[in-house]
Image (cartoon, coloured by chain):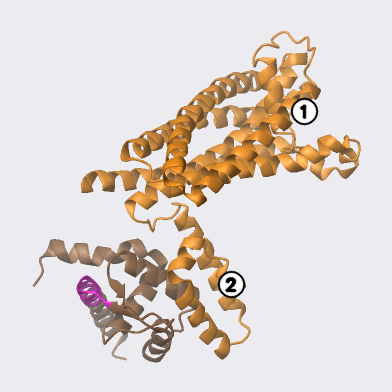
Chain colours: A brown, B orange
Amino acid sequence: MPGRGSRSAEAGAFVSFGRYAGPATLILSSLADGPKHGYALTKDIEQFADVRLAPGTLYEALSRLEGQGLIEALASDDRRRPYQLTAAGAQALRVHLADQRRVAEVGLRRLSRSWGPA
Amino acid sequence: MGRLLRWYPPSWRARYGEEFGQLLLADIAERPRSWRRAADVAANGLLARCTSAGLTSHELPPLEQVRCGVATLCCALAAFVTFGVAMLAQLAMGWQWATPRSAPAVAASVAMSIAGACLVLIALSGAVPVAWHAAVTAVRRRDGRLMRSAGLMLVSGTVLIIGTRHFQNGWPGTGGTGALHGLVPAGIAAFGWASTLSVSSFWVHPALLGTLPAAELAWMVLSPFAVLGLLAGFAGIVRRLTLPHWLLTYLSRLAMAAVVAAVPFLAGAASWVLATAPGQPGLFRPGLINGAELATMALALVVALRAAIGVRHARSAITEML
């Protein structure tokens, strides 16, 4: 179980992403079940999140994730290069999603208390 | 698809171009016409260009960041100096014939002259070691791309100097009788005037343009390209050279000093343009072109400052690594 300090450092990996934090989370979540190339990522994200990432946004987020060492490109004979999650990327995603779940749980609990169950 | 890819800088295209092209082809097959895709690619391409110039919070690897940041900083400061020289040349010409009756114009002339001299000294202090290092490297490595950048810089610089020397003979300040006409030495003022002839309000007055001699008009069109060539050559050299760490540190410190020197220059220019009372004689009366010059200088200084901050962060990262 990582300590508080390392949690902050891992969550901080997303801080510098600015408005690309959302696309980065979607990409990492998509890569969590195995390597994918750009088009496969777009289709997978569209399917599980109902969000279609535009090509420019997808590649800006990919280049930032690669620059931070959270994903890595795999060798390919094809022109479509696949990407996979690194260990650091998996840990950063785990911490980030846990933080998001905590926020979501608090929000839902308060909503239910003040506005009644959904 | 090629048109869309051109929004991105060459270094980005070399790394991601092929796979990004495949994704674009698939996207175009699904949605043949999409203005949102075009806008998204254009916006992100421009962002990638800003990143490659060391201008975004998403930084490059430290050494690359320093190299790109220094190149951008130099280009931004050169743009600042170009428009600043045009403004100072106007004031210097005014001093040849009259003394301004407004304190902001006097203060601006003095502040801009001193800060301008500092900026030129700083530019020379940086250009000399870079030129020497580039010449030695080009000869030793026989690097074609480096030689092309050096050649572009040399040709552009030669055109700029020869053209300016030729046209400075027509400087309207010659023979002036103003009380303080030695504020900026006449030769320097004339050189500044002739090298920035293209920064002129004549462009929005076609009737006035028509009254100029054809050669002068041609120089007004050609000289900005010579300045751009000089800058592109310099930026190419800084980005392609493997400058030693001490030289990069020296250049980034010089660039910070230049940013500091540019502040009183801009403050002087702003005080003249914004605070001069009406009724000033001829050239001391600020016009729309001076407002445009001031805005451009302010923008260039903001870009320079942003690049300087990026360079500073990257230098700290390099020092930590060492």
Chief secondary structure of the magenta portion: helix
Amino acid carrying mark 1 in the image: Phe
Image-quadrant location for residue A80 = bottom left
Secondary structure under badge 1? helix
Q: For label 2, count other residues whose C-alpha is less than 10 Å away and answer few (under 14), some (14-19) or many (20+).
A: some
Residue B295 makes an appearance in the image = no
Locate residue B273, reporting x and y percent: 66, 31
Q: The N terminus of chain B appears in which quarter of the rendering?
A: bottom right
Query: Compared with residue B34, is residue B241 higher up or lower down, i.e. above or below?
Result: above
Labels 1 and 2: the sequence-earlier one: 2
Amino acid carrying mark 2 in the image: Leu
Q: Which mark is residue B167?
A: 1
B183 vs B321, left or right, is: right
Q: Residue at x 37, y 56 (%)?
A: B60
Residue A94 makes an appearance in the image = yes
Where are the magenta residues, as a range?
A85-99
B214 vs B262, left or right, is: right
